Image (cartoon, rainbow, N blue to C red):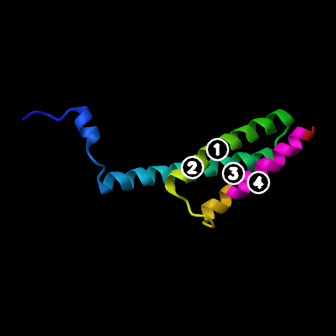
């Protein structure tokens, strides 16, 4: 019996299990990125110097952008706890960016 080619396998529709696994992966990534962003944001508040604070804020911003992308992929609903946390992190980063620009 001949084995299917890679192209033939890629053309097959996704099974329900594969779709569920993909969704779960996006959601886990979302939670991980949100956690990382919040952690960096909190640590930036107690940073020892401006360079450390800027590094942590930059890491928080990157994690936030990744989390936004993943939220869009998962269809995270407005008003959900995750959406609220994303909004809070985004607001913190925006306010802190404005403060940094003033220095």
Q: Which quarter shows the C terminus? A: top right
Q: Which quarter shows the N terminus? A: top left
Q: Nearer the viewer, residue 41 or 97?
A: 97
Tell me which residue sits at (60%, 44%) in the image. Answer: 66
Q: Secondary structure at mark 2?
A: helix
Q: Specify whether residue 46 is in view.
A: no
Instruction: Name the mark nearer the viewer: 2 or 4.
Output: 4
Tell me which residue sits at (83%, 46%) in the image. Answer: 96
CA gap between label 2 and label 4 equals 19 Å
**Residue under numbered circle 2:** 32
- The reply to whether dot 3 and dot 1 touch (C-beta < 8 Å) is no
Mark positioned earlier in the residue sequence (3 or 1): 3
45 left or right, relative to 30 = right
Q: Estimate how packed mark 2 is, as few (under 14), some (14 to 19) or many (20 or more) residues with alpha carbons within 10 Å.
A: some
CA gap between label 4 and label 3 equals 12 Å
CA gap between label 4 and label 1 equals 13 Å
Mark linked to residue 65: 1
Mark positioned earlier in the residue sequence (2 or 3): 2
Per the rendered image, the range of residues in magenta is 87-101
**Residue under numbered circle 3:** 38
Q: Percent position (x, y) of residue 82? A: 61, 60
Q: Estimate how packed mark 3 is, as few (under 14), some (14 to 19) or many (20 or more) residues with alpha carbons within 10 Å.
A: many
Tell me which residue sits at (82%, 42%) in the image. Answer: 47
Q: Determine if the magenta segment contains residue 78.
A: no
User: For residue 23, what is the image quadrant?
Assistant: bottom left
Instruction: Name the mark nearer the viewer: 3 or 1.
Output: 1
Mark positioned earlier in the residue sequence (2 or 1): 2
Q: Percent position (x, y) of residue 4? A: 17, 35
Q: Estimate how packed mark 1 is, as few (under 14), some (14 to 19) or many (20 or more) residues with alpha carbons within 10 Å.
A: some
CA gap between label 2 and label 3 equals 10 Å
């Amino acid at each position: 019996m001949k084995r299917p080619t890679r192209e033939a396998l890629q053309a097959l529709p996704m099974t329900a299990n594969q779709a569920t696994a993909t969704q779960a992966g996006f959601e886990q990534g979302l939670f991980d990125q949100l956690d990382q962003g919040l952690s960096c944001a909190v640590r930036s508040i107690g940073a020892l110097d401006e360079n450390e604070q800027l590094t942590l804020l930059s890491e928080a911003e990157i994690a936030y952008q990744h989390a936004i992308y993943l939220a869009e992929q998962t269809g995270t609903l407005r008003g959900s706890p995750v959406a609220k946390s994303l909004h809070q992190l985004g607001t913190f980063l925006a306010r802190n960016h404005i403060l940094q620009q003033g220095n």
